[in-house]
């Protein structure tokens, strides 16, 4: 193999962003994908590109990381939140609250859009290609999460309901997390996202669905189940000799608070490409650009995990009096002195499931455990490095 070629392992959003930027810079780029297409982990479910981190609006962010919009990317300025007592709080924002995107291998999905951009830029994608050995030269590895710190259980379906966003905060239906309903152009995603007690995911989902249908008059046609999981961790090197670079959730890049990890993943891919193009340290780029965001979101997760249902009621009550909640969210994602101090506490209390690469629970049928063995068999020979402080 030509040592001047950059080999990219995995065709997720992080690595496709890296491929786009490398190919545009005239660097020979090969993406090795063990599947026969992109987005096969997903089932057409909706996700969000949040608009409160990175100190820039989503469209500016996409331009910054070299991505154009050739996929469904719908701005939402309103979300209806419901407290554990089902009290409604309407959140309206001047700038988009978030941009809805679709995951999977449908034509309008984010995954397909990024694939098309990578190919158009000149990157080569080799399908059904599971590498057995580490290639020479620079290798970018983004093969997805290695454990589950949060899981989502839900359905995608067709509906006549108008476009909308609903969110439910209640530990009885989404432990330490939230349930959500996203509707766009006749399609919808409903799911509960939980950060603990995974083995009872089906019970929580049934409860969440019952609550949602109490509140929302929506027709559910042709439902299909889906599940997902996310992994967040700190304290591991993101590169080996600045030659093997880890991106996305393979390196723990995720939003620990809500699981809105797409921007973190895409930005890590962009930084990997910049490291290669400018011959600078990927580790240092991540430490300067991503580490502060990661520390901040870990503090936010630690604080949120201690709030409980009583706290959710109070938070939503305060939010109901705020004209533009984006200002508050952006403030809470800044790397302030208070967050740096609290991080020293939060990091001691937070434990990622990455320490156990086997099933999270014995005799369990949750989203993570059902997929764990499949992911284990798909791991590359160059798995993440050992912990370090």
Image (cartoon, rainbow, N blue to C red):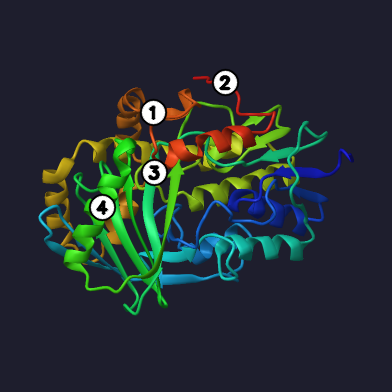
Where in the figure is residue 180, as x and y percent of width and height? 31, 58
The answer to which of marks 1 and 3 sits earlier in the sequence is 3
Image coordinates of residue 302 in percent, x first then y, are 29, 35
In the image: residue 65, left or right of residue 208: right
In the picture of the structure, the residue carrying the numbered disc 1 is 361
Badge number at residue 206: 4
Q: Spatial distance from mark 2 to mark 3, Cα to Cα?
A: 24 Å
Disc 4 crowd rating (10 Å Cα; few below 14, some 14-19, many 20+) is some
Which quadrant of the figure has residue 68? bottom right
User: SS for tag 1?
Assistant: loop
324 vs 376, left or right, is left
Within-10-Å neighbours for mark 3: few <14, some 14–19, many 20+:
many
Seen at 26% across and 41% down, the residue is 176
Name the residue beneath numbered marker 2.
386
Report helix, strand or loop for mark 4: helix
Question: Taking the image as drawn, is residue 231 in sight?
Answer: no
- Sequence-earlier tag: 1 or 2: 1
Q: Mark 3 points at which residue?
A: 151
| Residue density around tag 1, few if under 14, some if 14–19, many if 20 or more, within 10 Å | few
**Alpha carbon separation for disc pair 1 and 2:** 23 Å
Q: Is residue 80 above or below residue 35?
A: below
Q: Could you tell me how far apart the alpha carbons at marks 3 and 4 are, in whole angstroms?
A: 15 Å
Estimate the spatial distance between the alpha carbons at disc 2 and disc 4, rounded to whole Å.
39 Å
Q: Nearer the viewer, mark 3 or mark 4?
A: 4
In space, the residues marked 1 and 3 are separated at their CA atoms by 13 Å
Whole-percent x and y of residue 97?
35, 64
Dot 2 crowding, Cα within 10 Å, few <14, some 14–19, many 20+: few
Q: Earlier in the sequence, mark 2 or mark 3?
A: 3
Q: Which of marks 1 and 3 is in front?
A: 1
Task: Residue at 79% x, 60% y: name it.
Answer: 122
Residue at (70% x, 33% y) in the render: 244
- The earlier-in-sequence mark between 2 and 4 is 4
């Amino acid at each position: 193999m030509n040592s001047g070629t950059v080999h990219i392992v995995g065709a997720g959003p992080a690595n496709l962003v890296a491929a786009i930027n490398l190919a545009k810079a005239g660097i020979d780029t090969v993406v090795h994908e063990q599947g026969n297409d992109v987005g096969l982990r997903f089932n057409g479910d909706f996700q969000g590109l949040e608009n409160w981190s990175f100190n820039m609006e989503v469209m500016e962010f996409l331009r910054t990381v070299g991505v154009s919009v050739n996929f469904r990317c719908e701005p939402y300025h309103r979300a209806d939140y419901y407290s554990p007592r089902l009290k409604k709080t309407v959140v309206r924002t001047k700038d988009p609250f978030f941009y809805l995107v679709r995951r999977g291998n449908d034509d309008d999905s984010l995954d397909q859009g990024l694939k098309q951009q990578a190919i158009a830029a000149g990157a080569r994608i080799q399908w059904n290609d599971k590498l057995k050995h580490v290639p020479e030269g620079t290798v970018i590895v983004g093969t997805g999460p290695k454990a589950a710190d949060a899981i989502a259980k839900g359905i995608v379906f067709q509906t006549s309901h108008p476009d909308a966003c609903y969110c439910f905060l209640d530990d009885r239906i989404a432990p330490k997390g939230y349930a959500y309903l996203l509707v766009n152009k006749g399609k919808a995603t409903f799911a509960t996202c939980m950060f603990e007690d995974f083995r009872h995911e089906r019970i929580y989902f049934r409860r969440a669905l019952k609550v949602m249908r109490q509140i929302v008059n929506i027709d559910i046609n042709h439902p299909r189940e889906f599940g997902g999981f996310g992994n967040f961790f700190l304290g591991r090197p993101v590169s080996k000799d600045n030659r093997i670079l880890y991106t996305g959730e393979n390196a723990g890049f995720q939003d620990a608070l809500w699981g809105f990890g797409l921007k973190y993943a895409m930005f890590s891919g962009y930084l990997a490409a910049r490291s290669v193009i400018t011959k600078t340290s990927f580790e240092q780029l991540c430490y300067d650009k991503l580490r502060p965001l990661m520390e901040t979101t870990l503090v936010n997760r630690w604080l949120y995990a201690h709030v409980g249902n009583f706290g959710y009621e109070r938070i939503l009550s305060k939010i109901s009096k705020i004209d533009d909640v984006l200002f508050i969210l952006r403030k809470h994602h800044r790397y302030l002195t208070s967050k740096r101090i609290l991080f020293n506490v939060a990091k001691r209390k937070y434990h990622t499931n990455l320490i156990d690469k086997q099933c999270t629970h014995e005799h369990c049928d949750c989203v993570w455990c059902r997929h764990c063995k499949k992911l284990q068999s798909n791991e590359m020979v160059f798995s993440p490095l050992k912990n370090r402080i």
